[in-house]
Image (cartoon, rainbow, N blue to C red):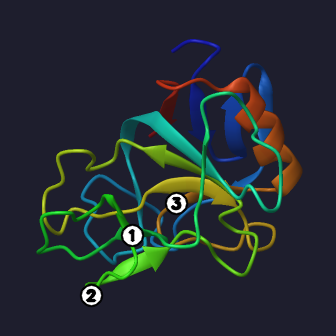
Amino acid sequence: MTPFDLVLTPRGVRFQGQTYPCSIGKGGVSAHKREGDGATPKGIHYIVGMLYRVDRLCAPNGWSRPIGPNDLWSDASGQPDYNHPVRAPYDHSHERLRRADPLYDIVWITDWNYPDATAGKGSAIFLHQWRRPHYPTEGCIAFRRDHLLKLSRRIEPGTRLIVR
């Protein structure tokens, strides 16, 4: 481990000597992640992208990309674009990235089952803003907004997320 790793602990995510409270999946941490199980996948995951709502905040860093009104994420397990960004209109199961609530104002994309997705292994494992303190996610890791913004300015592509 290095000081530049994000490490999930029972108290939150540790990064550069600080611990940030977070929420994890309602299914806990799982070594056998499946689509729809609500679990946060165990392992070492790399941050491979960051998206943000340009209409709500400034770019948190030089490498993040804006979320557009037609941006979606496919969770349609049997489709070739499963666990990839897609654009509306999209006739298969998906998650809207441009949400009315602030949960996806900043989204970090992990390499969980991406880019070479295996059907049914789980999709859209992101790091994003929490709904409220410690409210469970569908498998993502979620933070307080101010913590997410602070971390977004400090991480780089390839930062490791370690989930034990």
Nearest to viewer (mark 1 / mark 3): 1
Task: Indicate whether 55 appears above or below 14.
Answer: below
Which residue has dot 3 on it? 140
Badge 3 element? loop
- Give the residue at x 18% y 73%: 77
Among numbered discs 1 and 3, the one appearing first in the sequence: 1
Disc 1 crowd, CA 10 A, few/some/many (<14, 14-19, 20+): some
Q: Distance of mark 2 from mark 1, alpha carbons?
A: 10 Å
In front here: 136 or 99? 99
Residue furthest to the bottom in view is 91
Nearest to viewer (mark 2 / mark 3): 2
Which residue has dot 2 on it? 91
Counting every numbered tag in the picture gives: 3
Instruction: Answer whether labels 2 and 3 touch (C-beta < 8 Å).
Output: no
Q: Distance of mark 1 from mark 3, alpha carbons?
A: 21 Å
- Residue type at the position of mark 2: Asp
Among numbered discs 2 and 3, the one appearing first in the sequence: 2
Disc 3 crowd, CA 10 A, few/some/many (<14, 14-19, 20+): many
Disc 2 crowd, CA 10 A, few/some/many (<14, 14-19, 20+): few
- Residue type at the position of mark 3: Cys
Which residue has dot 1 on it? 87
Badge 2 element? loop
Task: Indicate whether 70 appears above or below 46.
Answer: below
Residue furthest to the top in view is 2
Instruction: Answer whether labels 2 and 1 touch (C-beta < 8 Å).
Output: no
